[in-house]
Image (cartoon, grey):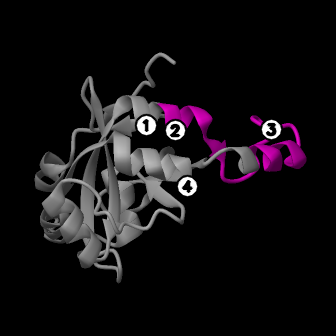
């Protein structure tokens, strides 16, 4: 089966979608223990959420990069995620979306959400032909993410390490069996 170049694929159910982020232990451990982000979570910068587990593994080096030692699976209300994606502006000028750079720059200033499509990754973290979505949240979108959309947070660092160990041992079938079941995701009705 051929995967479309740009298709959101995620672990999801009727009510929620799971996205991933990696943090330093102080943030990751606290958020996982609380099941939500702590009151002191910084909201003043862009935060990027990724529905692709393997893209997250590429980004955080299987939870080994400094400051990214804890990988969190964050369950979000679909309505919040969908609203964010609908208002997202590409992080780079896309001629198929905005005729000129001036129009794109105006849209960037109006929207607290960015989107970019980066090559999806395989178990060896090599790029694939299709893309994985990343959604960048700032301003009011971060507030929605932290206060309204998040319904649960789990630490999946041990899972990341287990899958990586299987890949290192060349047990790709065993590694695949442990991956989250990411299926095509359709945005809900607006």
Residue wearing tag 4: 138
The residue positioned 47% from the left and 57% from the top of the image is 48
Q: Earlier in the sequence, mark 4 or mark 1?
A: 1
For residue 172, side relative to residue 66 (left or right): left
Mark 3: give few (<14), some (14-19) or many (20+) Cα within 10 Å: some
**Residue 5 position within the rendered picture, expressed as x and y whole percent measured from the top left:** 54, 37
Q: Work out how far the residue at label 2 is from the one at label 1, CA to CA, in angstroms.
A: 5 Å
**Residue 76 position within the rendered picture, expressed as x and y whole percent measured from the top left:** 32, 40
Q: Are marks 2 and 1 in contact (CB under 8 Å)?
A: yes
In which quadrant is the N terminus drawn?
top left
Residue wearing tag 3: 98
Mark 2: give few (<14), some (14-19) or many (20+) Cα within 10 Å: many
**Residue 92 position within the rendered picture, expressed as x and y whole percent measured from the top left:** 71, 53
The residue positioned 35% from the left and 79% from the top of the image is 67
Residue wearing tag 2: 84
Give the residue at the far top of this rendering: 189
**Above/below status of 125 relative to 130:** below
The residue positioned 12% from the left and 66% from the top of the image is 158
State the extent of the magenta-drawn residues as a range. Answer: 83-107
Q: Are marks 4 and 2 in contact (CB under 8 Å)?
A: no
Q: Work out how far the residue at label 4 is from the one at label 2, CA to CA, in angstroms.
A: 10 Å
**Residue 78 position within the rendered picture, expressed as x and y whole percent measured from the top left:** 36, 31
Q: Nearer the viewer, mark 3 or mark 4?
A: 4
The image quarter containing residue 169 is bottom left
Residue 94 part of the magenta-drawn span: yes
For residue 127, side relative to residue 89 (left or right): left
Q: Earlier in the sequence, mark 4 or mark 2?
A: 2
């Amino acid at each position: 089966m051929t995967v479309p170049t740009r298709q959101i694929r995620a672990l999801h159910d009727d009510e929620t979608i799971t996205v991933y982020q990696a943090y330093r232990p102080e943030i990751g451990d606290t958020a996982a223990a609380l099941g939500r982000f702590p009151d002191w979570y910084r909201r003043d910068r862009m935060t990027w959420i990724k529905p692709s587990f393997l893209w997250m593994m590429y980004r955080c080096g299987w939870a080994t990069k400094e400051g990214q030692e804890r990988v969190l699976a964050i369950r979000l209300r679909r309505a919040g995620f969908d609203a964010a994606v609908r208002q997202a502006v590409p992080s780079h000028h896309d001629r198929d979306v905005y005729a000129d750079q001036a129009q794109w720059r105006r849209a960037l200033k109006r929207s607290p959400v960015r989107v970019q499509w980066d090559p999806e990754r395989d178990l060896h973290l090599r790029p694939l032909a299709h893309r994985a979505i990343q959604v960048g949240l700032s301003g009011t979108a971060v507030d929605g993410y932290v206060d309204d959309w998040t319904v649960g947070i789990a630490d999946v660092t041990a899972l990341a390490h287990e899958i990586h160990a299987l890949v290192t041992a060349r047990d790709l079938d065993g590694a695949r069996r442990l991956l989250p079941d990411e299926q095509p995701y359709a945005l809900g009705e607006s």
